[in-house]
Amino acid sequence: MCAGILPSRGSKSLYDLIRGLRNHKGNEKEYIQNCLKECRSEIRSQDMDLKATALLKLIYLEMVGHDMSWASFHVLEVMSSQKYHQKRVGYLGAVQSFRPDTDVLMMATNLLKKDVAASQPTIISLPIAALPHIATPSLAMSLLSDLLPRLSHSHAAIRKKTVVTLYRLALVYPEALRAAWPKIKERLMDGDEDSSVTAAIVNIVCELGWRRPHDFLPLAPRLFELLVDGGNNWMAIKLIKLFATLTPLEPRLVRKLLPPLTNLIRTTPAMSLLYECINGIIQGGILGDGEDFSAREEIATLCVSKLRGMVSLNSDPNLKYVALLAFNRIVVTHPFLVAQQEDVILECIDSEDITIRIKALDLVQGMVSSDNLVSIVSRLMRQLKMSSAALSQQRNGLEGQDLETGSSDEGADPRRRSKTQEQAPPLPDDYTIDVIGRVLRMCAQDNYASLVDFDWYIDVLTQLIRIAPASQQRDLGSDLTSSTPKTAIDISEKIGNEIRNVAVKVTAVRPAAVRAAELVVSRLFLETSLSRPVVSGALKPVAWVVGEYPFQLLSPDDTQRHLLDLSPRVENPEVLATCLQAILKLFAHVAGDDQALWTPERKAAVSLLMARVIRVLEPFASHPYLEVQERAVEFIELLKLTAEAAAGQAPCTDELHQDPPLLLTQAIPSLFTGWELHSVAAGAQYNVPMPDDLDLDEPIHHDLNSLLAQADSLMIPVPNEDEFEAYYNEKPTPTSISSEPALSRLPDAPEEPPSSYQQAGEESYLDPDIVARRKAERLERYRDDPFYIPEATRSSTPIHTILQKENGPDLDIDSIPIMQLDLGKLSLNSGRASPNKQPAQPKPQTRQRIVVAADETLAGTGTGTSGLSTPLRYDSETNNNPDAPTRARSAAAKKLKQQALLQFDSSHLGDLRLEGAAASGPRSGGGGGGGGDPLAHERQQREEAEMALALKEVQRLRLEMQRANERIQVAQGVPEGGKTAVGGMAEGGEGGGEEGEVVKGRKKKKKKAVVEGEGETEAEGAPVAKAKKKKVKRIVRLDEGDDAAA
Amino acid sequence: MINAFLVFNGQGQPRLTKFYTQLDTSIQQRLISEIFTLVSNRPPGSCNFLPLPPLLASASSSSPNSPDAPSLVTYRNYATLYFIIISTATESPLALIDLIQVYVEALDRLFENVCELDLIFNFETLHAALGEMVVGGAVIETGMERIVAGVRAQGTVAKRPVNEGKGGGLTGGLGAGLGMGGMVWHGR
């Protein structure tokens, strides 16, 4: 430590460096570059003090973000210092800067062995604490034998560190655990062992426990003993966590555990221990099923009431968070217990704290039912609306402030602004996107099972589309060319997809969905300025809807016009392709009426329209995206042909009846009408049975090559239309997708109008125009319904407010009768638990039976495909969806293999059998003494692989060092020294397999190179030295200034 | 397991970084700045846990529910400093809050009335103290006495440089005394 602080021989100490950093505010970069340059030369010094100080400075700079991987060799040098304080700096450098690709590590093995075997405990600690950071399989293998004796070192501190280090070594080299486990177990069983060592062992046993719980069942008695009279909260927490993984394997443990756990819950003053007890009870499956019912009921009551108290209002936010975490675990096994807490959990959705919100949302998603969907979604929608309003307000506010800086009420202004920020802080974009995704998922769950009011849903979707793009407009403004955020686009496309799904699946509300799509198109048209590209991903599905169902459009002409205007500005080719298709569909609808007369007006209008469409399409004929190009070319040709026909067809006159051209009224519309499209399950294609007579190995044609050769010269006869007709209409039934939809009827859905069970009106989260439109539609629909009570009389149901007051915020939690485990009574209880669904309104009459078409699929061939018929699947949903398709699962497994950031990879441990090791007793170190034959074989294979790896490493190391050195030399502009150094490296590397030799050789050469390098810099370094002196002087001056000031 | 232990100040400047798995320096810095953004936007009265920063969220979504993956970011704010622990689900969230407390108390014992300056100039001691509590991501010691004794056994703990803190009275006057960048340090 002192080495770092005290300046030595005119060079900068760490202290100087830090002060210098603080004195160079503004041009820190330059200062740091200079310091790095100094460190580079200092670290090559022969003087160990100087070297260590330079390394310490580098470690400091690394913390701030300056790579020091180039110095790894010097780290080794300092590690091998004789002086403890220098050695410590070296080890710190290794811990902080060594990465998986740091190759000098191979040279460190002997050093590490030596230090592990040192006599002073402080020195032993260094390699032990550093090993977890730098361990590789080969390093672990060679150090294992040195570490094992340390498990019985006289210092407890060494023993416990060794335990942990052995665990970390086992992660990269599982055999280490096999050798170490007997000794660790011995320590654990030893009642006289230092308590902190025991705690450390429990800690790692807990880590191992979830991976291989079976191996630790025999330890249960000892662990139980520790839990009862350990007296250490930290260890107790770990023990409880461990037991939670053991109880599912050994149900008898439950009876034993219940008394001490209940006791802990009742008596412990430590909130963390209390929480972990509850958590352990939940995770260990101690709640619920079992023969000793009364005791369990008691403890379940206790746990849930405690958790409920944690979540409820006014409690410590940390407790709120952990209680939600616990609920998130309970919900997997005991959803009904969580459902009873719906009221308090819903309150958390509106928490200011995003962490709590997200956890609450995780929970809520699993609790959605037709009763609470609307109220949950309303809450979320209100948040989103307010946040997007706040965002735009903030932007306007900032702009406005620039203008009114001179205004008189300057004092009041900032206060006002901060207040509005407090009220509704704009939510981060990724959170907004996440919430929108959840809203969609909740509504679409199980093929819209929880959704009662589809009109409301369509309004929500319309509103969401308005909210979603607002978040990405900013990105659009800042940089168009580079990465427009994909997720943002995805989310608005997802919303659009929902509109499309509803339009396709729910025929009853198709008109409303189509009108919503129409609205979206016209809004897109109105809101994006002419010069700006259209980026909203929603356009694609929405354009498809307006094209597919033109009959439901209010104004097909306008919609077509909007699409025509939008198309040239669409950037995404896939969206564009859909738009083109929609344009032609709309054209067929607008112009293809075969009933109307072919009047001169119509002729003129149609010709004009065609000309317009062709003009829009023409640029796309050379579009780089093939789909777009193909469609554009086809449509242009078709329209040109039709235009000719239309021009040739004289219009009707009073005396002469003239039909419109058939091309216009028959041919083009027939392209798009015919079959109604149904939604098809994602995996339906896989279920198509293979015809018996189909032999995929059979060549298509016995003489294919000559056929292909002829193809150029041959005119392929155009098949006549009858053939096509036959092909499409006479498909063999088994391969066609069954057109009989498997209808799933919504169970007697409550037909009450939605606003009655919302806490606040839709006005709070829907834009006024959406609400107005909605109202008008509803009035229209119910005009003749005698049972319909108009809005005005209904909106203020007094019961609602009364109940809310009674169950509302000033509710005393303890006074709430606690739930009973009896599932049968659940429906009664839950009625009391949630105020939202209270008003049991008389059902007026079955208004309309909403039928949601299920995805079509062929009779499932396997259980794995049954999950494929879920209407919508998002990638991120796979973790929530229990029967996610196997394909997604295998993809996830594949991903799992790639290490996630910061993740400890303990997957290797899964295959290791500890019992075998324990039975055959302690083994000699180095992974020695083969067990069974398969084990020996396994080890041999691994050793061989490691050998090959090691050889490769040496090879790579040589090259890397060479290159690194070149880089350094180039950076310093010292060509001659560089050459010798490179030569030295290469020669050193040539040594090959034997490690010791490599190290030796390299060290010698290195020294030589360093010396030469030094000479170089000395010779040409006069100005550098001067500059350095100057800097030092200045710093000193500043120091004095500070002193004076202080 | 603890995946990382970080300390940075109110400006996001790191004072201690310890990653228990190897990570590129650039990614370390990205992670720190992401966490800093999260931590500096907390409304008053929030809990001591952060949502996963984007870097970790994307990583953990690729391997959901694996107890090996980091799933918890705990933080605690002392005066000008933020203490962060990134951990897996096998750690107890509330216990981690206490762990940070133990660490800060241990530093307080070592430096006597610790302040940010001590941490800036003695980051080796920070590492030493952490090394007595956490090894390789596993908590090995939570007893104050042993931690302090363990650090002291490694050599004397340097006091803050003499001309930095006049007599240890670390109130606002100190920042003004150094007169640098308008920074003000408060003692705990």
Image: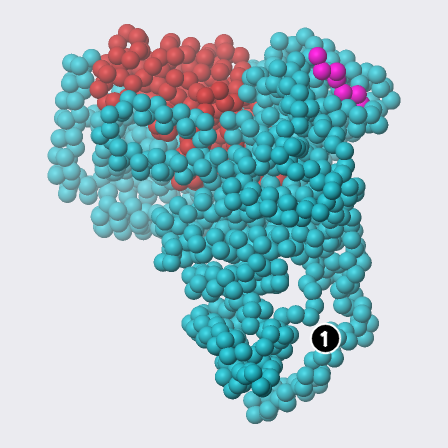
Q: Main secondary structure of the magenta part?
A: loop
* x and y percentages locating residue A842 in the rendered image: 76, 33
Q: Is residue A28 left or right of residue A148?
A: left
Q: Label 1 neighbourhood size at 10 Å, few (<14), some (14-19), many (20+)?
A: few
Q: Is residue A526 above or below residue B120?
A: below
**Which chain can be seen in cyan?**
A
Label 1 resides on the chain identified as: A
Give the residue at x 26% y 12%. B173
Residue A91 in sight: no
* Residue at screen point 72% across, 27% down: A838
- Quadrant containing the N terminus of chain A is top left
Identify the chain drawn in red: B
The residue sitting at 56% across, 83% down in the picture is A654
> What is the span of residues highlighted in magenta in the rendered image?
A815-821
Whether residue A816 appears in magenta in the rendering, the answer is: yes
Question: Which residue is rendered at x = 44% and y = 20% of the image?
Answer: B77
Residue B19 image position (x, y, % from top left): 47, 32
Residue A997 vertical placement versus A259 (above, below)? below
Occupied quadrant, residue A151: top right
Q: Tell me, yes or no, if residue A657 can be seen here.
A: yes
Instruction: Please give left or right for residue A743 compared with residue A382 in the image.
Output: right
Relative placement, left or right, of A644 versus B165 is: right
Q: Is residue B142 above or below residue A245?
A: above
- Is A660 placed above or below A563 here? below
A2 and A797: which is toward the camera: A797
Give the colour scheme shown. by chain
Q: Is B11 in front, or is A999?
A: B11
Type of the residue with mark 1: Tyr
Could you tell me residue A923's position as x and y percent?
67, 31
Q: Residue A792 appears in which quarter of the rendering?
A: top right
Residue highlighted by disc 1 = A728
Q: Quadrant of the C terminus of chain A?
A: top left
